[in-house]
Image: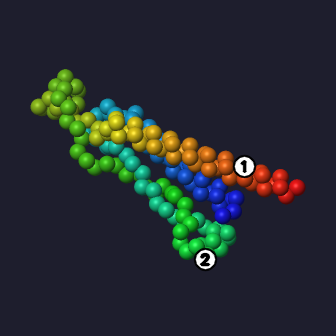
Amino acid sequence: MDFMTSMKISSAGLNVQRKRLEIISSNLANLETTRTQEGGPYRRKDLVVTAMPLENEFGQTLKNQLGENLKSANVTQVIEDQSEPRLVYNPKHPDANELGYVAMPNVDLLDEMVNLTTASRAFEANVTATNATKTMAQRAIELGR
């Protein structure tokens, strides 16, 4: 694998994890949002990540040698979780129904914190891979001198 292909793969990973961190942050920020422009409580969001063929001249040559295994990750869609909202008894809340229950977002704090940790670690791993690629390229240049 050449330098640019490695950087493209790491860059795609960084992009996916950055978007994942943004979505998780939005979910956490709206943990108590009971009213949205669409109506009803905030719905948890998630990403659909798809493996796409890595396309460049070297990638095409490598694909011919290795088959269809060389892929890059891309965010293809942001989806809303369609599960039912949590009902919390709070008759004094302005959004409470006639029985005193408030429809709260379907966001679980613990799940989001786990997702935040894994996305952060994946982002760090991609940064490490990018830095390792840069170091190898610099050393190769030094050896060529």
Above or below residue 23? Residue 50 is: below
Query: What residue is shown with label 1?
Result: 135
Q: Quadrant of residue 28?
A: top left
- Tell whether label 1 touches label 2 (CB within 8 Å): no
Residue at the spot 31% in from the left edge and 48% down from the top edge: 81
Picture coordinates of residue 6, whole percent (x, y): 64, 58
Label 1: which secondary element: helix
Looking at marks 2 and 1 on the same chain, the residue that comes earlier in the sequence is marked by 2
What residue is at 62 percent from the left and 50 percent from the top? 129
Q: Nearer the viewer, residue 55 or 92?
A: 55
Which quadrant would the N terminus be assigned to in this image?
bottom right
- Is residue 6 positioned above or below 83 on the image? below
The answer to which of 143 and 70 lies nearer the viewer is 143
Which amino acid type is marked by label 1?
A: Thr
Q: Residue furthest front?
A: 143
| Residue 37 visible within the image | no
Residue at position x 54%, y 45% in the image: 123
- On the picture, is 54 further left or further right than 28? right
The residue singled out by tag 2 in the image is 64
Mark 2 vs mark 1, CA separation in Å: 28 Å
